[in-house]
Amino acid sequence: MLKRKFVKKPVIVEAYQTKKKQVIKTLEGDMIASPGDWIVTGIKGEKYPVKPEIFQKTYEEYD
């Protein structure tokens, strides 16, 4: 099998940082978001929580 390399396409998403523990209904099932986690809305309207340290390494603000 020949392995190939790919670059993920840039996608603009909306996100907010939660201040309270909450249950987020994701495509993979319910997930718990802790205070400080980012709640990201994907390109199809799906939501998922992202830990702050991962969010900082993965996303940058778009104007």
Image: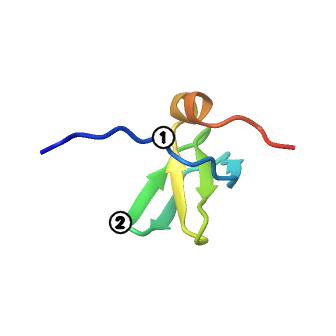
Residue 34 x %, y %: 52, 44
Nearest the eye: 43 or 2: 2
Residue that numbered label 2 is attached to = 28
- Residue at 61% from the left image edge and 54% from the top image edge: 40
Q: Secondary structure at mark 1?
A: loop
Mark closer to the observer (2, 1): 1
What quarter of the picture does the C terminus occupy?
Answer: top right
Q: Is residue 54 above or below residue 14?
A: above
Q: What is the quadrant of the N terminus in the image?
A: top left
**Residues under labels 2 and 1: Cα distance?**
24 Å
Residue 62 falls left or right of residue 53: right
Which residue appears at 51% of the width and 38% of the height?
51
Of the residues shown, which amino acid type is indicated by label 2? Glu
Closest to the observer: 61 or 47?
61
The location of residue 33, given as percent across then percent down, is 51, 50
Q: Which numbered circle lies on residue 25?
A: none
Identify the coloring: rainbow
* Residue lying at the far left of the rendered structure: 1
Q: For residue 35, what is the image quadrant?
A: top right
Describe residue 59's horizontal placement relative to residue 6 as left or right.
right
Q: Which residue is mark 1?
A: 7
Report x, y in % for residue 4: 30, 40
- Which residue lies at the image location 56% right of the left edge and 48% below the top edge? 9
Q: Amino acid at mark 1?
A: Val
Quarter assignment of residue 28: bottom left
Q: Residue furthest front?
A: 2
For label 2, the crowd category at 10 Å Cα-Cα, with few meaning under 14, some 14 to 19 and many 20 or more, is: few
Question: At 52% across and 51% down in the image, what residue appears?
Answer: 49
| Number of disc labels | 2
Helix or strand or loop: what does disc 2 sit on?
Answer: loop
